[in-house]
Image (spheres, grey):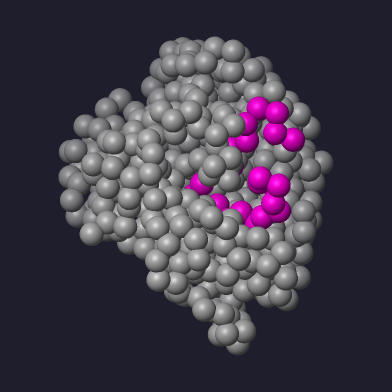
Amino acid sequence: MSLLEWESANCYRIRRRGKMRVDAVVYLNNALKRSFGEEEALQQLADAAALPGVVEPVVGMPDIHTGFGLPIGGVMAVDAAGGVVSAGAVGMDINCGVRLLRTNLEAGSLDKPLLRKLLHAIVERVPTGVGKKSRQAALVRKNLPRYLVEGVPFLIEQGFGRPEDLECIEEGGAMRGADPAAVSPEAVERGAQLSTIGGGNHFIELGRVDRVFDAAAAAKLGLAEGQLTVLIHTGSRGFGHQICTDFSALMWKAAARLKLDIPTKGLAAVPISSAEGQRYLAAMACAVNFAFCNRQWITHDVRQAFSAVLGGDDRSYDLGLVYDVAHNIAKFEEVGGKRLLIHRKGATRALPPGHPNNPPLYRDLGHPALIPGSMGTASYVIVAGPKVEQTFYSVNHGAGRVLSRGAAKREIEVEELKESLGEILVLGRNYREYLDEAPQAYKDIEAVIDTFTEIGFTRRVARLQPLAVIKGQGKES
């Protein structure tokens, strides 16, 4: 029997029971609810609701599915003074996130041979696939501590980007509190993966603005129908994965020593104020900055690829940064007059107009949230309204899986995948190797987006349709 009870339009509640300290809520519209089968993910929300210092409610996003500890599409806020921090509630790929670049090119002006040339030029510069290392390995080794502490501002100082990029990156591209001394040698070794996209659901996508829903907001973002865009989706790679692995084990042992009642290993947690908690936050901030630098470096490489293929300077094609948002992160924020540590795992921060933490450029609009679909379906640019405070200023981060990677490979045929991709150009791999990322393995992005727009939490700005996609080989979270 499902734990969900109807609460209000598109909102379902998991009432406090057993060791739960607070209720949880899940947001689903009617279409998603009819096909919903994520009972394990619901139990993971209930487990998170049992942690010390948790604040009501623990939140499940429309794209919720089972993860390690907190479900993917989960938001957990804890009291900043007396709560705990959990590595598993942030996730393995710390600051997995997405950024959007606009161009001044009409998408229809690029035929398939030209799109293919652009893809090849990008791949020449950006290694793709699990375990792949940077083409700038010597520079990474020399400067890794500064990348981890200073983030994107230092990378731009080195010439990898434009000064105005900093206005359009969450945290300004540099999260405070990073300390490389908190990072294990094993994680440092995996820092060589900077400026790569990895595998799994990570991608670089050339797309078209298929539809504008809010002309004024789209104009503020520099988006117009028919325009060519670039989406970049990747995170902290093996560096962040190692940090999560290290601290999940450390927190599990420390919790036992401190006699904390922790429901599962995946939610291993320690007091924020503890030595282990402070070390994790310092290491996590390093991974956050690593990921911001990763997407920034790739942005530089994409700009260079456009210039190499099309000629001239990269600014000739605009290639300005619209925004960059994190998906897996824990941040101290104020909500409802309370200072909280908000864990977002597979969730995107979305601040409404006027919120003081918006970048100045988007203060009156609210910064855009970028919601990628699957490799064969639309992605969305949205903005939040004031009601999003109810989810601790959080929205979903993508479409969300309905099939595990193994199930997708077993159940989806190559011909089904080819049919669903249609004319979308995919570079680099046999179709069979893409089956775990097939559109059929994901929820309907339209229903996921509708869930919050139908109740006034968000509004659509623009829809992007994929034209050409780069994906790396291998499984990643």
Magenta highlight on residue 464: no
Residue at 36% over, 58% down = 42
Q: Which residue is found at the position 82% from the left and 41% from the top?
A: 157
Percent from the top left, x then y, of residue 439?
30, 39
* Residue toward you, 180 or 185: 180
Can residue 245 be seen at all in this image of the molecule? no
The one of 415 and 338 positioned closer to us in this rendering: 338
Residue segment shown in magenta: 334-356
Viewport quadrant of the N terminus: bottom left
Which of the 4 image quarters holds residue 32?
top left
Q: Residue at 76% x, 29% y: name it.
A: 360
Position of the C terminus by quadrant: bottom left
Q: Nearer the viewer, residue 79 or 221?
A: 79
Q: Nearer the viewer, residue 15 or 448?
A: 15
User: Which residue shows up at 40% across the image and 25% down it?
Assistant: 465
- Give percent across and percent down for residue 413: 17, 45
Q: Position of residue 294 (x, y in %)?
A: 63, 47
Write down the quadrant of residue 431 in the picture.
top left
Asked if 430 appears above or below 468 in the picture, the reply is below
Please check the rendered image and state whether residue 339 is part of the magenta-colored stretch, yes or no.
yes
Relative to 71, is 270 above or below? below
- Say whether residue 275 is left or right of residue 445: right
Whether residue 416 is visible: yes
**Placement of 67 over or under 445, stated as above or below:** below
Count numbered badges in the picture: 0
- The outermost residue toward the bottom is 257
Give how far across and how far down residue 97 sits, in percent. Answer: 55, 45
Query: Would you identify the image quadrant in which residue 398 lies?
Result: top left
